[in-house]
Amino acid sequence: MYRFLLTPRWWGINVFVLLAIPFCIFMGSWQLSRFEGRVHDHRAATQRADADRTAAATPLARLLPVDKRTSGMRATATGRYATQLLVPGRELDGKRGYYVLTLLRTDSGKALPVVRGWLPGTADAAKAPAPPSGEVTVTGALQASETPGDNGVTAQGGLPAGQTGAISAASLVNLVPYDVYDAWITLDKADSGMKAVPAKAPDNTGLDLKAFQNLGYTGEWFVFAGFVVFMWFRLVRREVEALRDAELGLVPEGEEPAVV
């Protein structure tokens, strides 16, 4: 009854099934490992963030370039405040507002972008407190340069003078006449009249949409594997039923059994 499984057509079906099932299981397992890796990174980043809040500040130069390990660590730098810019369209505690970003000119000749705080409402230079004069030492959480389109960072152009959409060296170098560090810090304590901006977790270390996409893909691949098995059994069953009908003479003369 089941000799048809050895026919050339069924050899092709069987080989496809034998290859498809382990492939689907492998892809599902790989996507699951990606999700588990993101969960591990999220836990590690959370633990680091808790430790960084109480750790002693480290000189800026020793933490560069910014990576997953150094992002969020408390950094310190000394210099004089120079150009001040506003970063519109930033939310804090569910409210819309803007960052007050001031460039700190250091002895190295480069400037460090410093987010001195957040204010609610539409970006208005007149409402932004002026930076302290003279030499200052700042301490805050080290952050990697932003990429427009990620984590709510606006990609819009044509902003008014004195504003920038992203805090990144690539954006700021076109707005100031001096070199800028490829990093920035957000002060532990905001300057008078503003709220401190909390540090962000490094990219790809949170349970974000990408993480749950990996989990969704895991389920899809395992479903595909089950579907392949289901369809194979369904095809075998229909083939057997067609052969039985033919043996019982239920198939009209001259007509071959219909098999899907």
Image (tube, helix red, strand yellow):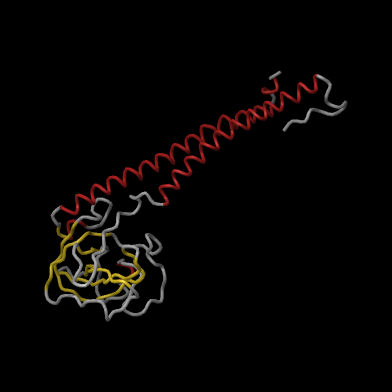
- Residue 174's spot in the image, x, y percent? 32, 74
Foreground pick, 66 / 84? 84
Q: Is residue 235 left or right of residue 219?
A: right
- The number of discs equals 0
Assign the N terminus to one quadrant of the image.
Answer: top right
Assign the C terminus to one quadrant of the image.
Answer: top right
Foreground pick, 8 / 41? 41
- Residue 128's spot in the image, x, y percent? 25, 76
Looking at the image, can residue 113 be seen? no
Q: Is residue 64 left or right of residue 225?
A: left
Instruction: Name which quarter of the figure residue 97 lies in.
Output: bottom left
Instruction: Name which quarter of the figure residue 201 lies in.
Output: bottom left
Instruction: Name which quarter of the figure residue 56 lies in.
Output: bottom left
Looking at the image, can residue 251 be seen? yes
Q: Is residue 77 left or right of residue 26?
A: left
Is 60 rendered above or below residue 98? Answer: above
Is 211 rendered above or below residue 239? Answer: below
Is 192 rendered above or below residue 38? Answer: below
- Residue 61's spot in the image, x, y percent? 17, 60
Q: Is residue 74 left or right of residue 168?
A: left
Foreground pick, 132 / 259? 132
Foreground pick, 80 / 214? 214
